[in-house]
Amino acid sequence: MTTAFRTGRDPLGCHRVLHPQGTLPQAADRLDNSLPPFEDEVQIAVERLNVDAASFTQLESTGRPVAQQIEEIVQQRGKMQNPVTGSGGMLLGRIAAIGPAYEGCLKGLPIGTSVATLVSLTLTPLHLKRILAVHPHAHQVEVEAFAMLPSSAPAAVVPNDLAPTLALSVLDVCGAPALVHRMVQRVPQNGHMLFIGAGKSGVLSMAAARAVRPDLKLWAIDRYQGPLDEAYAAGLCDGVHAVDAADALAVRAAVQEFTHGALADAVIHMTSLPGTEMAGILATRKRGTCLYFGMATSFSRVALGAEGVGADIDLLIGNGFVEGHADLAMDLVRANPRLRGLMSKRLGL
């Protein structure tokens, strides 16, 4: 099938911005999600949306059908960007057409190649036809849709040795283990790392730290005992404690127990719920490091909260893009059968 491409383009996708003019696609209130694609875009026939945990949790909390809310958001905004959390997720699909001026990472691949985006749905024009099914346990939605990516947007070919649902789940948070892989270099020998949240980004990050720095003591907290027990049984951490991260004082007490009062040299904060920012700050020792990766994080609360308690610590914002992050995360799952089994079980595979 021959695709007619529109002329006029911008490598950052700004030609898709409808309102307000002068903004980048992620900051825009509305995108042009119409077809056909522009000459420097790749068009993807979307099969699945992986909605980020913070957004999916918020949608479920309203009591309204998640599918209906997603349809309304895309109709209003031309993209899947939760107006409450500001976050989106990513997608899986197959290349439907590649524009003649497209210069991105998917250039030259055959039509029909299975790919996953490594950029957020918050900047991806989405032409949604219908929602076929919602899978709450995986935070995934089966759809019939088209998405358009500019040349600047990274994406990855979906490997054929992993189930598509598992691959999508891993790629959704692959920036977290890649950042942890880099970050552990600054932790002292035999130091302590705390992981706040034992979801998919949490267990992948624990696996990354364990693979690079087996000398470190890794501790995990979560609201629920089940995910913690799974992470511990898989050998991903040395100790666990079920505690609500919204209770920062309780988190600090748990970490003091783990470390015999020393607190953590590094904290990886990746909860999907708001109001947990101070837990990471109080758990980190003086001149330690706290990385915030969860999309429910209020960075003003982080900065002002650290100042308010006189916490002289390094605060890092999790960047979802790290060079080589997709391959690193996939290799972690391939190399660790217990990690792969844990994630597959959670996805119902």
Image: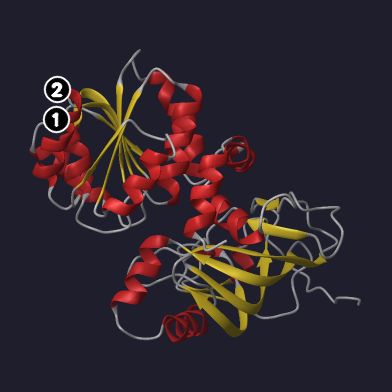
**SS for callout 2:** loop
Amino acid, disc 1: Glu
Q: List the single residue furthest toward the front.
A: 233
Q: List the single residue furthest toward the right.
A: 1
Q: Is residue 33 visible?
A: no
Neighbourhood count class around disc 1 (C-alpha, 10 Å): few under 14, some 14–19, many 20 upward: few
- Observer-nearest of 195 and 44: 195
| Location of residue 133 in the rendering, given as x and y in whole percent from the top left corner | 55, 80
Q: At x 67% / y 52%, what residue is drawn?
A: 162
| Location of residue 107 in the rendering, given as x and y in whole percent from the top left corner | 81, 53
Labelled disc at residue 47: none
The answer to whether marks 2 and 1 mark residues whose Cβ atoms lie closer than 8 Å is yes
Number of numbered discs on residues: 2
Residue 342, above or below 111: above
Labelled disc at residue 260: 2
Q: At x 78% / y 70%, what residue is drawn?
A: 7
- Observer-nearest of 185 and 319: 185
Residue 295, above or below 3: above
| Location of residue 342 in the rendering, given as x and y in whole percent from the top left corner | 49, 49
Q: Is residue 30 visible?
A: yes
**SS for callout 1:** helix
| Location of residue 136 in the rendering, given as x and y in whole percent from the top left corner | 44, 71
Q: At x 43% / y 43%, what residue is drawn?
A: 203
Residue 29, above or below 209: below
Amino acid, disc 2: His
Horizontal side of residue 245 vs 78, given as left or right: left
Q: Quadrant of residue 69?
A: bottom left
Labelled disc at residue 257: 1
Q: At x 45% / y 87%, what residue is drawn?
A: 68
